[in-house]
Every structure is written in C-alpha cells, then in structure tokens.
C-alpha cells in the first residue's frame, strides 16, 4: 500500500515538473514585451478616458505615443500642451503644436427668435426626436434642446439654458473632448480654435434653406446674402448652400462682418463694447 502511494506521489510530481517546463517554454515563446515607458506616459495623462484623443482610453493613447515616430496627429485635449510636452520629454520626442479648441453651438434659435409651431410629446432625447420628425419649429436645422450634449459632457462644461432652451458652453471648463459634437444628431456643435480672452466670431446658424424660408423660420437665421463675404478682407468667410461660415484660423477679429450682417446671425463674444458713432466722429475731429 505504501509503495502504491509513493509511486503515485512520484508520478504526480514528475507530471507537475514536466508541465511546468512546458508552460515555461510556451510562456517564453508567446510572451508579449511591453515598453515600460507606456506606464510612465499613462501616469502623466489626466485619466479622463473621454475619447477626445481619438482612442478608447488614456492607456491606448500612451501606447500610441510610445510607438509613434512623431506626435503628429496625436494630442490629449484635456491635458493640453503641458501634458504633451511632458510626454515628449519622457520619450525624447518633439511635441506637435496643436491650437487649443473649444466647443461652439452653431445655432441661436431661442424661442424669442424661433417660434414653436408644434409640441413634441415623445422621449426627451435629441437623437430620438430627430429620428421621428423635423422638430417643433419651422427650422429643421436648429437645436432641439433636449440635452443629449449636456448628458454626454463629463466635465460639467455644458448646460441647457431653461429660457433659451439652448446649450450654454463654459469656455473655462470645456476641454474640447468632442463628446458633445458626437452626441448632437444635427451636427451643430463644432470645435473651433480658441483665441485669447476667449473671443469668438462665428455664424450662429446652420440653416441651409434659402433666405426667405430661413428668415421666416428664425429671426436671426443666415439668409446667404453674401454681404459678410464681400466685406471680409482676409478670405475668412465662405458661402455654401445658402450658409456663411467663418474660418477661425483665418479670422482676424476685425468685426466688420458682424456689423454688415442684416439678420444678426454673426455673434461676437467677449469683445469690448463698440464705440458709438458720435464718439468715433469726435476722435476723428481731434
């Protein structure tokens, strides 16, 4: 009996040893090497996992940064230039120069400007509402106001105003992750170049209808008259499908287009008040 137990123990021990040897060689054969710098880069990333960089999470971005020859096309919008500079230092590479951006709503269709023509009694989600009908106003391009963008924002940078029923974006909190851009079924939120003092000039309209129907649907709609294009000396404004668009990279903030727009569709944000004509005339005399 004792010999049987001894043989069993020896057999199992031998089998375990052989299995261990086989597993060792298999592990060596198929082991995956992971660059330790990936952990270093991930440690400096903000761990927001927002997807603004175009990857599923910060770990994936760290892997891409380590493997890439250059930083071109790679950026962490939440961490910004300081984080990318630190990542470049760790990896011995040169950080790409990326202009900071901020989310902007291309619509100004508040109830005062855009009359409600029907009542929506379905699920309070822009995605669902947009798939069911053309909206509760005469403008099928404007903001629906049900807050898909607000719910998508992880940084508390966007809220629906209860009076205008439009999203209000905080320049201070917005990290340009792009979540709200993806959440909007009408594609009327875009990331624009962020300027000094958070100044912005843009066409707050997305209506591609001709002038008459667009103006009847919304008092501040772009009517595609082209006056802003003619007055711009910097080729920053284009007109396509009855809608003007201002290129933030070309705009010099001369503000001539704002005055020229007959429907006030062009907004100027965070600029000092304009001088009255009497003040300008007095300065010219002096």
Image (cartoon, rainbow, N blue to C red):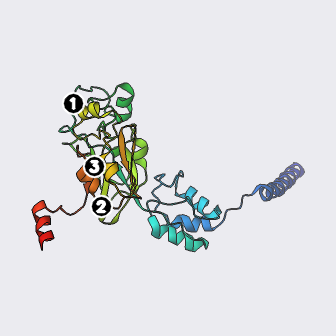
- Element class at badge 1: loop
Dot 3 or dot 1: first in sequence order is: 1
List the residue tagged with mark 2.
254
Give the label, 3 or 1, closer to the camera.
3
- Compared across the picture, whether 72 is left or right of 242 comes to right
- State if disc 1 and disc 3 touch (CB < 8 Å): no
Residue pictured at 31% horizontal, 33% vertical? 124
List the residue tagged with mark 1.
116
Residue pictured at 42% horizontal, 48% vertical? 179
- Compared across the picture, whether 173 is left or right of 84 comes to left
State the image coordinates of residue 238 (x, y, percent, origin top left): 40, 47
State the image coordinates of residue 93 (x, y, percent, origin top left): 60, 71
Q: Quadrant of residue 255?
A: bottom left
Q: Quadrant of residue 249?
A: bottom left
Q: Quadrant of residue 88?
A: bottom right
Give the camera-side residue of 109 and 59. 109
Query: Which residue is at the far front?
Result: 285
- Compared across the picture, whether 92 is left or right of 32 comes to left
List the residue tagged with mark 3.
266
Dot 2 or dot 1: first in sequence order is: 1
Alpha carbon separation for disc pair 2 and 1: 35 Å
Mark 2 is surrounded, within 10 Å at the Cα level, by few (under 14), some (14 to 19) or many (20 or more) other residues, namely: few
Dot 2 or dot 3: first in sequence order is: 2
Give the label, 2 or 3, closer to the camera.
2
Residue pictured at 31% horizontal, 62% vertical? 198
- Compared across the picture, whether 154 is left or right of 6 comes to left
């Amino acid at each position: 009996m004792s010999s049987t137990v001894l043989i069993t123990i020896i057999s199992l021990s031998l089998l375990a040893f052989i299995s261990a040897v086989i597993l060792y060689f298999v592990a060596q054969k198929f082991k995956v090497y992971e660059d330790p710098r990936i952990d270093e880069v991930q440690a400096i990333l903000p761990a927001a996992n927002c997807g603004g960089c175009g990857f599923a999470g910060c770990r994936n971005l760290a892997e891409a940064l380590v493997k890439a020859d250059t930083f071109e096309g790679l950026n962490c919008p939440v961490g910004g230039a300081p984080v990318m500079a630190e990542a470049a230092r760790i990896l011995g590479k040169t950080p790409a120069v990326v202009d900071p951006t901020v989310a902007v709503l291309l619509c100004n269709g508040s109830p005062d400007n855009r009359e409600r023509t029907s009542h929506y009694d379905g699920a309070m989600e822009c995605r669902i509402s947009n798939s069911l009908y053309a909206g509760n106003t005469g403008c099928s391009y404007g903001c629906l106001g049900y807050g898909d963008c607000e719910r998508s924002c992880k940084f508390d940078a966007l809220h629906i105003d209860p009076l205008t029923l439009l999203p209000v974006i905080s320049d201070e909190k917005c990290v340009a992750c792009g979540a709200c851009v993806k959440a909007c079924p009408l594609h009327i939120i875009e990331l624009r170049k962020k300027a000094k003092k958070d100044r912005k000039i843009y066409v707050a309209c997305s209506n591609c209808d001709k002038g008459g129907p667009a103006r009847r649907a919304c008092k501040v709609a772009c009517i595609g008259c082209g006056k802003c294009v003619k007055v711009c000396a910097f080729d920053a404004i284009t007109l396509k499908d009855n809608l003007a668009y201002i290129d933030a990279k070309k705009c010099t903030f001369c503000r001539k287009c704002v005055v020229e727009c007959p429907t006030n569709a062009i907004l100027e944000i965070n600029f000092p008040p304009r001088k009255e004509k009497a003040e300008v005339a007095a300065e010219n005399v002096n």
